[in-house]
Image (cartoon, rainbow, N blue to C red):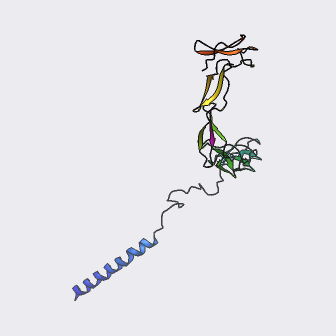
Amino acid sequence: MVAVRHRAWHWVLLLSLLVAIPLASQERPEIGPGTEQGTPTDDGPPGESPVNPCAGKADGVRCPDDGTVCTRDICRAEQCRHEPARDGHGCEDDGNECTDDICAAGACTHPMLDNETPCTSDDNPCTADQCLRGQCEHLILPQGTVCAEDGEPCTSHTCNERARCVRSVALDGAICPSDGDCCTRDICQAGRCTHQGVRHGTPCDGDEEGCAKGGYCLWIDGRPQCSVIASPAGDAGC
């Protein structure tokens, strides 16, 4: 009988311990940020004010930057102020060549440039590269616009209706720049300016250099020369 009572008391004691352990864990205070045993918070000790960078500083002294180029970061009445910078001051580029990047009322703005402001070329001589409503456009030039020069007076390069630069050749026989010789004809042939000798006996009393009043073009040594004689010798021509 004593042994039975002893075993019953043993079970009562064991159950009491099992109940007491969870209760003890629930009553334990939790350690964490801001508590006496935890890590202090970022705000610092209670009641401490943030550091004033302008305390005791004169007006106009620079203070911490607010990160924008369109404000002036200066002390006023011992407070850090971020006053608007001068309007028109340059600011961050928006990557658009047809807008300006300027400060206005303390903010970075991007107003459109004037229409017809030149912009990046598309390397097509038959387009006009200019800003239009804030965008770089490549406007087709009128048909017939000169688009290139090759130094040859008997050719021309003009734009067609498809904005392509097209080379044209002058008709054979078209007049081209003079070589200054009275005894040559300055005409286009196959797209080139040629200077062909005139017929033997052709008058050469023009205004060009080497001309003579009352003179005639005479073929001498294989080329025509302006000479003053009573009458042309022979009737040979070029």
Residue at 31% over, 79% down: 14
Is 225 left, or right, of 22 in this rendering? right
Q: Foreground: 16 or 234?
A: 234
The extreme bottom residue here reads 1
Q: Nearer the viewer, residue 197 or 103?
A: 197
Residue drawn at x 27%, y 85% is: 8
Q: Is residue 145 on the magenta stretch?
A: no
Q: Residue at x 60, y 39 (%)?
A: 168
Task: Locate the C terminus by quadrant.
Answer: top right
Please tell me whether residue 1 is drawn above or below residue 137 in the rendered image: below
In the rendered image, is residue 224 in sight? yes
Percent coordinates x, y for residue 208 in the rendering? 72, 19
Question: Which of the pair 182/83 is nearer the observer?
Answer: 182
Give the residues drawn in magenta, as a range. Answer: 153-162
In this rendering, is residue 186 above or below 17? above
Q: Nearer the viewer, residue 28 or 167?
A: 167
Q: Is residue 70 visible?
A: no
Query: x, y percentage for residue 59?
Result: 77, 42
Residue 165 image offset from top left, x and y in percent: 60, 42
Q: Position of residue 231 (x, y in %)?
A: 70, 13
Is 155 colored magenta in this rendering?
yes
Q: Relative to 6, does residue 68 appear above or below in the rendering?
A: above
Snapshot quadrant of residue 214: top right
Q: Count every numbered label the image shows and give the total.
A: 0
User: What quarter of the picture does the N terminus occupy?
Assistant: bottom left
